[in-house]
Image: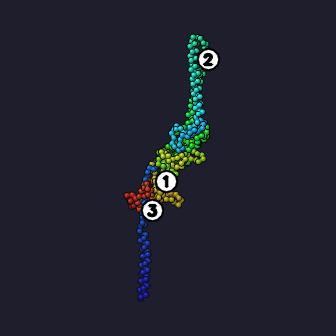
């Protein structure tokens, strides 16, 4: 009897356990999957300035290589190297003794020509009076008149000689043709210089304003022109910001002045010239810089924080978007450029899309999510929660 009782109890226990195992999956299947909490940003069109960063070098707005216009020995140097000079300020003094002598000789020749002209004029006037009285022939009067004209021409020639001698005498004082900063003198006192020699005595450069010549490839310039034909895109204001060699930003903005009309065949690039104020002479000719040019304005740009743009197995950009049912969708994107810590999206998103920027590692397409709306702070490049929170039930 005892053995039968134990057998029956065992059978009942096995049946109970089997019943529990059958019911467990049923309870699990009926429970809904938990929603994953994610942070989203709502895509809104905004006005964005599109910039292009280009390499370039600073250049003087005016450059004057100082060369003598007459020959002579340098007697004095009248400037300090590296100082600012004014337009017309004397820089070198040549030995002018021979030029003074030539000037005095020309002046004496002019005085002689004036005397000859006066004598010829008196003779001509007297012969005219005698001709009226028929005391001299017409031929004699014509000869006197020719002598008078020759004397008048001699006076003009003497005046030209004086002017030429005066100019050469003035050239013995070599002056700066422009205002700017003067460089190192290549000659010393006592050196012999010749008119229009190949080697410059020194160089004067105007540093305020200063030019910056930027280099842009012809392909990029073509892309920019095509960009300006796109809807919502207008031409930029041409303002230029500079990044110096140490990574700092130059304190003054410049303006784009002109573009070169031809492409350099050796580099395939076009030169863009910008002008910058340079009151502190911080920009020096030949300095390497990088310029950010405001090339266009997009009045309806779609920007997505970079953490909201992922890559698929092919390396193509994608974004996870929460639809109206609170499910995750995968969108293929096309991006044109990075603006700060955001991507400018040209295809794949539209206004009002909710792009997941936090929690994307815990989801996949089709996942049900609860969303918290975030806002991207462009000043700190961080996310902050908005005052209102949204859930999938409110979508």
How crowded pointer 3 is (Cα within 10 Å; few <14, some 14-19, many 20+) is rated as some
Examine the image and state in which quarter residue 1 appears.
bottom left
Do we see residue 5 in this rendering?
A: yes
The numbered dot on residue 34 is none
Secondary structure beneath label 1: strand
Separation (CA) of disc 3 from disc 1 = 22 Å
Q: Which residue is mark 2?
A: 143
The x and y percentages for residue 257 are 50, 43
Q: Nearer the viewer, residue 119 or 139?
A: 119
Residue drawn at point x = 42 percent, y = 81 percent: 12
Residue 62, position as x, y percentages in the image: 53, 41
Q: Residue 283, image x and y in percent?
A: 51, 47
Compared across the picture, whether 128 is left or right of 319 comes to right
Residue closest to the far bottom: 1
The residue that label 3 is drawn on is 359
Image point (42%, 73%), residue name: 24
- Read off the residue under disc 1: 338
- Choose mark 2 or mark 3, whichever is in front: 2
Q: Label 2's element? A: helix
- For numbered disc 3, what is the local secondary structure? loop
Q: Viewer-proximal residue, 330 or 139?
A: 139
Number of residue marks: 3
């Amino acid at each position: 009897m005892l053995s039968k009782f134990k057998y029956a109890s065992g059978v009942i226990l096995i049946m109970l356990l089997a019943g529990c195992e059958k019911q467990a999956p049923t309870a699990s299947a009926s429970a809904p999957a938990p929603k994953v909490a994610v942070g989203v940003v709502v895509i809104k069109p905004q006005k964005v300035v599109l910039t292009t960063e280009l390499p370039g070098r600073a250049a003087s707005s005016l450059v004057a290589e100082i060369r003598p216009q007459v020959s002579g020995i340098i007697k004095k140097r009248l400037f300090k190297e590296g100082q600012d000079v004014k337009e017309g300020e004397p820089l070198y003094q040549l030995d002018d003794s021979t030029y003074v002598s030539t000037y005095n000789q020309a002046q004496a020749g002019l005085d002689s020509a004036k005397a000859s002209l006066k004598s010829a004029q008196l003779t001509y006037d007297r012969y005219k009076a005698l001709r009226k009285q028929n005391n001299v022939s017409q031929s004699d009067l014509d000869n006197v008149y020719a002598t008078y004209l020759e004397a008048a021409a001699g006076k003009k020639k003497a005046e030209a000689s004086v002017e030429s001698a005066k100019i050469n005498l003035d050239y013995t004082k070599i002056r700066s043709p422009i205002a700017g900063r003067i460089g190192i003198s290549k000659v010393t006192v006592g050196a012999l210089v010749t008119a229009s020699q190949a080697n410059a005595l020194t160089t004067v450069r105007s540093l305020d304003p200063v030019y910056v010549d930027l280099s842009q490839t012809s392909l990029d310039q073509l892309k920019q022109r095509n960009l300006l034909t796109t809807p919502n895109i207008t031409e930029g204001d041409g303002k230029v910001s500079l990044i110096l060699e140490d990574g700092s930003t130059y304190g003054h903005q410049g303006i784009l002045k002109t573009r070169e009309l031809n492409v350099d065949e050796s580099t395939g690039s076009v030169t863009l010239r910008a002008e910058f104020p340079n009151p502190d002479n911080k920009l020096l000719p030949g300095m390497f810089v990088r310029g950010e040019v405001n090339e266009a304005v997009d009045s309806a740009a779609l920007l997505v924080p970079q953490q909201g743009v992922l890559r698929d197995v092919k390396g193509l950009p994608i974004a996870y978007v929460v639809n109206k049912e609170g499910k995750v969708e995968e969108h293929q994107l096309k991006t044109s450029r990075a603006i700060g810590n955001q991507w400018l999206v040209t295809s794949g998103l539209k206004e009002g899309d909710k792009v997941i920027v936090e929690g994307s590692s815990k989801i996949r397409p089709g996942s049900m999510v609860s969303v918290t709306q975030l806002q991207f702070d462009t000043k700190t490049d961080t996310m902050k929660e908005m005052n209102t929170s949204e859930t999938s039930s409110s979508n």
